[in-house]
Image (spheres, rainbow, N blue to C red):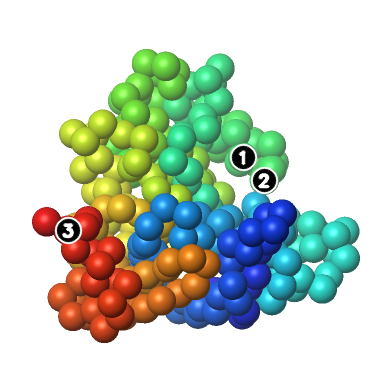
Amino acid sequence: MIKAEKVVKIFGELKVLKEVSLTIDHKEVVVIIGPSGSGKTTFLRCLNGLEKIDGGAIQIGDVELDSKLTSKEYNRRVRELRKNTGMVFQNFNLFPHMTALGNVIEGLVTVKKIQKREAEKIGEKLLEKVGLLEKRDMYPSSLSGGQQQRVAIARSLAMEPKVMMFDEPTSALDPELVGEVLEVMKNLAKEGMTMVMVTHEMGFAKEVAHRVIFMDEGNIIEQGSPNEIFNNPTMDRTKKFLSKVIK
């Protein structure tokens, strides 16, 4: 489903990603962990085409992004790639002037050109899926952070992505609201959605991930099953990181 091969990303004089290679299978749930500044979010943004890679190649489904492509062709392929990927950010990025339902159906109406009434039916099903159908007519300012993030997930799902990517989706939430968002993501995993998630939620990684990736200083240091990474890591850098984040 996803293949990254020797991906390099450079900002100025800083090499943030240093030939990162990773393959993710269909229906696999992969959680990326690591310290701040390790390249986790940058790697996710490269996978979704939000950052142009400076070396290597990325393939999602049938679409390949190669660093050697012209800017015009690269951007064209990014548009193709995003038809099959959904991205959920730390901050919810909802349109403040639209209701919850309006946010969910915006892409259906403007991108997929679906008639509004049909889009609303789809949107209502998705809001029900994330437990928010009764909030369909409320604006983001009237919703809690957890509710806004669930609307953001429903909005991404509306485009029927083959892959869902999450960039620390609970980091901006109050602790008591984290669980409701993670519950939605657990259900997506059970349904077989291919998922890539950057997070500090180690409990979620232990429970849901098929594979955990540990990154540091622009490299994948270690990867394995949750049991292998959390209970028997082999690399000293992984052990040191986990000793600080798991009490």
Upstream in sequence: badge 3 or badge 2: 2
Q: Is residue 59 above or below residue 182?
A: below
Extreme residue toward the front, this view: 13
Q: Position of residue 2 (x, y in %)?
A: 54, 74
Tell me if I can see residue 172 in this picture.
yes
Number of residues whose C-alpha sits closer than 10 Å to that of mark 2, classed few (under 14), some (14–19) or many (20 or more): few
Q: Amino acid at mark 3?
A: Ile
Upstream in sequence: badge 2 or badge 1: 1
Q: Quadrant of the C terminus?
A: bottom left
Q: Is residue 36 above or below residue 3?
A: above
- Badge number at residue 246: 3
Q: Amino acid at mark 1?
A: Gly
Helix, strand, or loop for circle 2? loop
Q: Which residue is mark 1?
A: 107
- Badge number at residue 112: 2
Q: Position of residue 187 (x, y in %)?
A: 28, 56
Helix, strand, or loop for circle 3? loop
Q: What residue sits 42% from the left and 68% below the top?
A: 215
Number of residues whose C-alpha sits closer than 10 Å to that of mark 3, classed few (under 14), some (14–19) or many (20 or more): few
